[in-house]
Image: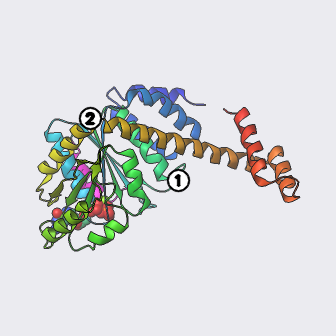
Amino acid sequence: VATSDVTELISELDGTARRRALARLLTLVEDGTPERLRAAIRELYPRTGRARILGMTGSPGVGKSTLTNAVAAELRSRGRTVGVLAVDPSSPFSGGALLGDRVRMQSHHADDGVFIRSMASRGHLGGLSFATPQAALVLDAAGFDDVIIETVGVGQSEVEVAATADTTIVALAPGMGDGIQAAKAGILEVADLFVINKADHGGAGKLASELRGMLEMGHAVETDASGAVSWWPPIVRTVAMRPEGIDELVDGFDEHREHLEATGQLDRRRRLRALHAIREIALEQIRTRFSRIEAEGDPLLESLSEKVAARDLDPYTAADELLDAMESDRP
Ligand SMILES: Nc1nc2c(ncn2[C@@H]2O[C@H](COP(=O)(O)OP(=O)(O)OP(=O)(O)O)[C@@H](O)[C@H]2O)c(=O)[nH]1
Ligand SMILES: [Mg+2]
């Protein structure tokens, strides 16, 4: 099925129609059929693995988008190209055309070394947690040196960012009840770097010492096999909209990258990410195929259901039989 156009799009990533090809590939990740998505990822995958993936997470309104914008600009000034994915689960119908995104696009719009894309939650196969890593692969394959993924940290999602990113920045802001509550939400644990944004507001110092207290209790601190501390997350204060502190933040990102490479953590994280991807894809395939046979009225599924209902068979044995049958008729 229509995989030749996928091949063509991928070849256009190296040409003058690059931005258009990128946009269309990302749309394919968001809205494409499972077959086209599979074709795209299979072909893109060998081109990936070069980009540094940076996750930016934190509670609503702490300044993640403003920070992402400033970090992208700082990385550009250091000669790096940057792809941005703004994952926005709270915007079901805007398609990401938020004011903030327009402002951001304006500040970089004449620059071919930056590409920004918002992803809303509607209409994804398997949801955002499935689509986001695939979209990151597209940006990686397109050759961006750095890919920044912005997500709102509301529970499960920061764990997912951490699973996709090499380095995760957790952004906090004073006066937003982010101290102790953040620890409860598990947001501290995924941080490789902390940003205290809105440092122009009072309370940044108090938040920083609260955070240091939590690190001292062992949260977010990485230890090696002998139990010694191998990474102590830096705490960087910023005023993202000025911007102030961004150079230090980007230095921290670089240092964390060097740490990952020097200690073998990068390979470990990438193996974990691969495992996560395989699991999500395998589960998604089972779900999709189950829905399909259910909708089409599969004779085996019907007879198994009858037997289970009649107590001739237990549901576990029935599920085993169904999985075996699915296995023997794989696409
Ligand atoms: N005073 C102050 N305001 C800031 C700073 N950084 C961002 N803001 C403002 O805070 C508001 C929220 O900023 P965003 O960057 O949209 O925050 P966000 O975390 O991306 O928000 P969501 O994506 O909705 O969760 C905006 O009005 C920004 O202008 C800062 O350092 N100081
Ligand atoms: Mg935002």
**Res. 167 visible in picture:** yes
Magenta span includes 168: no
Residue picked out by circle 1: 123
- Main SS, magenta residues: helix
Foreground: disc 2 or disc 1: 2
Disc 2 residue type (three-letter)? Glu
Foreground residue among 68 and 199? 199
Could you tell me how far apart the alpha carbons at marks 2 and 1 are, in whole angstroms?
37 Å
Q: As displayed, is residue 141 above or below residue 87?
A: above
Q: At 20% across and 68% down in the image, what residue appears?
A: 210
Residue 213 in picture, x, y percent from top left: 21, 66
Foreground residue among 236 and 38? 236
Q: At 18% across and 42% down in the image, what residue appears?
A: 255
Disc 1 residue type (three-letter)? Gly
Residue 161 in picture, x, y percent from top left: 38, 51
Q: Residue 261 shows which numbered tag?
A: 2
Position of the C terminus by quadrant: top right
Q: Which residues are magenta?
A: 96-110
Residue 245 in picture, x, y percent from top left: 12, 55
Q: Secondary structure at mark 2?
A: helix
Q: At 23% across and 57% down in the image, what residue appears?
A: 194
Q: How many C-alpha atoms fall within 10 Å of the one at disc 2: few (<14), some, or many (≥20)?
A: few
Q: How many C-alpha atoms fall within 10 Å of the one at disc 1: few (<14), some, or many (≥20)?
A: few
Foreground residue among 19 and 312? 312
Q: As displayed, is residue 16 above or below residue 320?
A: above
Q: Residue 218 shows which numbered tag?
A: none
Residue 133 in picture, x, y percent from top left: 42, 44
Q: As displayed, is residue 275 above or below residue 151?
A: above
Foreground residue among 126 and 28? 126
Q: At 32% across and 66% down in the image, what residue appears?
A: 183
